[in-house]
Amino acid sequence: MNARDLMTTDVETVHRDDEISEVLTRLGSADFNGFPVVDDDDRVVGIVTQHDLVHIFQPSDRTLWIPVGLPPFLETLEYAIDLSWDDLDRELDLLKHAGKPVSTVMTDDVVTVRPDDDFDRLLDLLADDERDINRLPVVDDDGKLLGIVARQDVLRAVRDERRKGEVGL
């Protein structure tokens, strides 16, 4: 069993110049959590995931410290006002990033596989402790996207083989 046997060939992709808001909209209606990013020749140049997109909306510290001196006190008191309203933060961050190209948040060091890569190589990549890889774009020698193998595809293959009663893959 190899990547060719497991890959899905109908792969939804985005381009590096697609706006973040457009990619977020597409991802919101998808039943997966990332897109390969391709150039005009369908060569893989990156990958963008939910994690990449959510990361740009991390709340920031918007606490305003106001010094207030009240007589008869000689010392100034400081009051903290929390200005970080979650909904407002997200909306401001969305406005700030919505028109930027997806290339500003994508991972450009993409781990890819070839169609003939064997099952053990796929397992090694998807179980790597250093990287949290959920999907492996399958590319030809020129880097052109042929398909994708998701972690779920590999797990499903293991399940199906076990149900058949076969020991090895």
Image: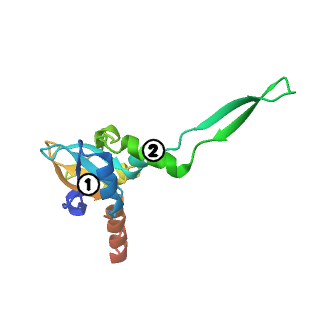
Q: Do tag 1 and tag 2 residues touch (Cβ < 8 Å)?
A: no
95 or 145: nearer the viewer: 95
Single out the residue that lies furthest toward the top: 74
- Please tell me which residue is depicted at 23% across the width and 53% down the height of the picture: 13
Under tag 1, what secondary structure? loop
Q: Position of residue 160 (x, y in %)?
A: 33, 72
- Please tell me which residue is depicted at 39% across the width and 40% down the height of the picture: 96
From the viewer's perspective, tell me whether residue 17 is left or right of residue 83: left
Q: What residue is shown with label 1?
A: 118
Q: Earlier in the sequence, mark 1 or mark 2?
A: 2
From the viewer's perspective, tell me whether residue 82 is left or right of residue 47: right
Q: Determine which of the numbered discs, if any, sits on residue 45 in the image.
A: none
**How has the structure been colored for display?**
rainbow
Q: Position of residue 147 (x, y in %)?
A: 20, 56
From the viewer's perspective, tell me whether residue 44 is left or right of residue 121: left
Q: Is residue 161 above or below residue 88?
A: below
Quarter location, residue 74: top right
- Please tell me which residue is depicted at 58% across the width and 38% down the height of the picture: 62
Q: Position of residue 163 (x, y in %)?
A: 36, 76
As shown in the figure, which amino acid type bears the numbered disc 1? Asp
In the picture, the quarter occupied by the N terminus is bottom left
For discs 1 and 2, the disc positioned in front in the rendered view: 2
Could one spot residue 3 in this view of the protein? yes
Q: What residue is shown with label 2?
A: 92
As shown in the figure, which amino acid type bears the numbered disc 2? Leu
Q: Residues within 10 Å of mark 1 (few under 14, many from 20)?
A: some
Under tag 2, what secondary structure? helix
From the viewer's perspective, tell me whether residue 83 is left or right of residue 96: right
Q: Is residue 9 above or below residue 99?
A: below
